[in-house]
Image (cartoon, helix red, strand yellow):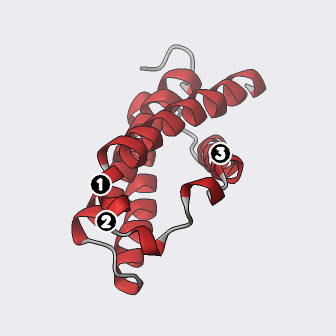
């Protein structure tokens, strides 16, 4: 179980890092450029800290699932991923939009991007962590 949980953390960390790169580094590049006064200049961005936060989030995501979900199925993991994504996405995207002058489209991209990450995390977790003999 420990090996599978560590594998799940690693797989989710890699997937979420790649998805964050696509969302923030590719799709939202022009939005970040248009709101440059709100962000640190690129040389000052703390990429190591960003990676650490993704790792901690992946660990907590996996820990909560292993600790509090009795049923380890693909369906249960995907439901958990959707709930995690909605909770995280709305608090980040809509919460930030409420207090900062970010474009609405950017905040919605954060919401839906985070929900997508939750679903992908749930899929990976469900495949890796599911009980043997249970679909």
Judge from the rendering whether residue 117 lies leftward or rightward of residue 68; answer left or right: left
Q: How far apart are labels 1 and 3 at the CA level?
A: 22 Å
Q: How far apart are labels 1 and 2 at the CA level?
A: 6 Å
Which residue is the site of mark 1?
A: 30
Circle 1 or circle 3, nearest the eye:
1
- Label 3 close to label 2 by CB (< 8 Å): no
Answer few, some or many: residues within 10 Å of disc 3's Cα (few below 14, many 20 plus, some between 14 and 19).
some
Local secondary structure at mark 1: helix
Answer few, some or many: residues within 10 Å of disc 1's Cα (few below 14, many 20 plus, some between 14 and 19).
few
- Label 1 close to label 3 by CB (< 8 Å): no
Compared to residue 112, the image places residue 65 above or below, namely above
- Label 1 close to label 2 by CB (< 8 Å): yes
Circle 3 or circle 2, nearest the eye:
2
Which residue is the site of mark 2?
A: 34
Q: Quadrant of the N terminus?
A: top right
Answer few, some or many: residues within 10 Å of disc 2's Cα (few below 14, many 20 plus, some between 14 and 19).
few
- Which residue in the rendered view is the most extreme toward the left? 105
Local secondary structure at mark 2: helix
* Residue 69 seen in the current view: yes
Compared to residue 50, the image places residue 39 above or below, namely below
Q: How far apart are labels 3 and 2 at the CA level?
A: 24 Å
Q: Looking at the image, is mark 1 or mark 3 earlier in the sequence? A: 1
The numbered mark at residue 133 is: none
Q: Residue at x 39, y 38 (%)?
A: 22
The numbered mark at residue 51 is: 3
């Amino acid at each position: 179980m420990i090996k599978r949980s560590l594998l799940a953390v690693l797989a989710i960390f890699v997937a979420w890092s790649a998805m964050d790169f696509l969302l923030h580094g590719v799709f939202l590049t022009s939005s970040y450029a248009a709101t440059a006064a709100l962000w640190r200049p690129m040389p000052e961005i703390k990429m190591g800290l960003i990676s650490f936060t993704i790792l901690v989030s992946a660990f907590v995501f996996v820990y909560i699932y292993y600790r509090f979900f009795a049923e380890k199925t693909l369906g249960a993991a995907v439901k958990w991923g959707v709930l995690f994504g909605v909770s995280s996405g709305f608090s980040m995207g809509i919460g930030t939009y409420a207090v900062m002058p970010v474009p609405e489209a950017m905040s919605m991209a954060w919401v839906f991007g985070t929900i997508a990450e939750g679903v992908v995390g749930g899929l990976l977790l469900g495949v890796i962590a599911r009980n043997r003999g249970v679909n």
